[in-house]
Image (cartoon, rainbow, N blue to C red):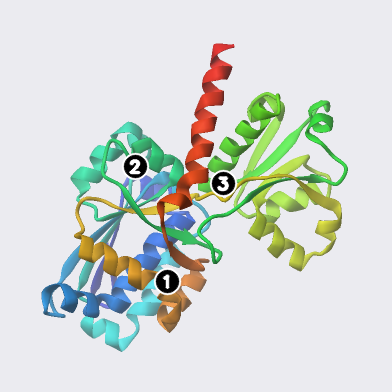
């Protein structure tokens, strides 16, 4: 438990917390939601109970697939920035618990979600499609670093290069990002390679590295120290703004459709009114100075309300990946 100005904010999770140290922009999303509860908590409690002094526990769970980028130290700092506000110190009515679920649970994750009594779960879309039939998980929000909820992946190579040319080399290297970014990148690449008649990525490339920042993926391709990398279109745009020469030396061979990497889902615990209130307020968090400060610290741009069509391309990709995997096994 972390106590900030005598208010209770619980960070638990045993193995997961110590092993992964809470890294992930999905982890950041969970923290931003908690910060929102601190800012809007008195109003929320009054609307739900008629008494702004009633303490209500909100339980969040973060699955291992989201870990990346943001440390628990930064998370606590973000909470402290909010808790220093006098109005929040006096009126914060919540006991908030955030658990990092143990990655060794795997198939037992649905049971852990049920037994933990969680209201909201932050997880990768890969895990969502893996567990959605075993436990109630209703997608409600997409935490995003850009204005949109969907992002496009790019397969980048040095100008003039092709997959065929790369495949003929003795040493072939690929760089992807860690966490949910890299996991979805591998699935997209494997599907792309299969549809183009090539072997899976671990066979096509002799070396696959994971890095924590997009720039660490792009720059080795620029300097011809790696053959290819996968980053988001937005990340490449930002990197090119800082170094215009990259656009002259690096090109995109393929671009994915708009994909969703991380979701925030509601379980069967919160009421429809609670979910709707959360959606309506979190999608306008940037209008609040305290929330905007916290989101900047945690490298978040906004929360996007999710609609069924937003997941169509991601679901189609995962379905296609399963199909190609089955075909390869039969060979």
Circles 3 and 2, Cβ within 8 Å, touching? The answer is no
The image position of residue 37, as x and y in percent, is 29, 71
Q: Which mark is residue 102?
A: 2
Circles 1 and 3, Cβ within 8 Å, touching? The answer is no
Q: Which mark is residue 87?
A: none
Is the residue 125 above or below the residue 193 in the image?
below
Label 3 Cα crowd, 10 Å radius (few <14 / some 14-19 / many 20+): many
Mark 3–mark 2 Cα distance, whole angstroms, equals: 18 Å
The answer to whether residue 315 is seen in the rendering is yes
The image position of residue 48, as x and y in percent, is 16, 72
Is the residue 60 above or below the residue 328 in the image?
below
User: Which numbered disc, 3 or 2, marks the residue that appears first in the sequence?
Assistant: 2
User: Which numbered disc, 1 or 3, marks the residue that appears first in the sequence?
Assistant: 1
- The residue where tag 1 is placed is 77
Look at the numbered disc 3 and give the secondary structure of its residue.
loop
* Quadrant assignment for the C terminus: top right
């Amino acid at each position: 438990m972390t106590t900030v100005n005598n208010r209770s904010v619980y960070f638990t999770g045993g193995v997961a917390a110590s092993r992964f140290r809470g890294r992930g922009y999905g982890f950041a999303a969970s923290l931003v939601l908690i910060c929102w509860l601190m800012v809007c908590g008195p109003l929320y409690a009054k609307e739900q109970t008629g008494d702004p002094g009633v303490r209500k526990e909100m339980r969040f769970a973060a699955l291992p697939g989201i870990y990346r980028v943001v440390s628990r130290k930064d998370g606590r700092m973000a909470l402290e920035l909010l808790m220093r506000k006098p109005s929040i110190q006096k009126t914060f009515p919540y006991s908030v618990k955030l658990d990092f679920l143990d990655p060794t649970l795997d198939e037992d994750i649905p049971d852990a979600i049920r037994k933990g009594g969680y209201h909201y779960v932050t997880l990768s879309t890969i895990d969502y499609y893996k567990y959605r039939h075993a436990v109630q998980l209703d997608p409600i929000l997409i935490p995003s670093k850009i204005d949109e909820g969907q992002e496009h992946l790019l397969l980048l190579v040095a100008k003039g290069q092709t997959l065929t040319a790369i495949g003929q080399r003795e040493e072939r290297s690929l760089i992807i990002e860690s966490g949910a970014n890299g996991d979805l990148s591998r699935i997209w690449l494997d599907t792309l390679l299969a549809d183009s008649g090539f072997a899976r990525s671990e066979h096509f490339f002799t070396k696959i590295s994971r890095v924590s920042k997009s720039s660490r993926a792009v720059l080795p391709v620029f300097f011809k120290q790696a053959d290819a990398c996968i980053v988001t279109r937005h990340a490449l745009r930002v990197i090119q703004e800082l170094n215009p020469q990259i656009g002259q030396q690096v090109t995109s061979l393929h671009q994915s459709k708009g994909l969703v990497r991380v979701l925030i889902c509601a379980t069967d615990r919160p009421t429809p009114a609670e979910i709707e209130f959360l959606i309506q307020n979190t999608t306008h968090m940037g209008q609040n100075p305290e929330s905007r400060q916290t989101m900047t610290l945690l490298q978040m741009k906004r929360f996007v309300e999710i609609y069924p069509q937003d997941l169509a391309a991601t679901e189609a990709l995962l379905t296609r990946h399963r199909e190609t995997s089955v075909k390869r096994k039969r060979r």
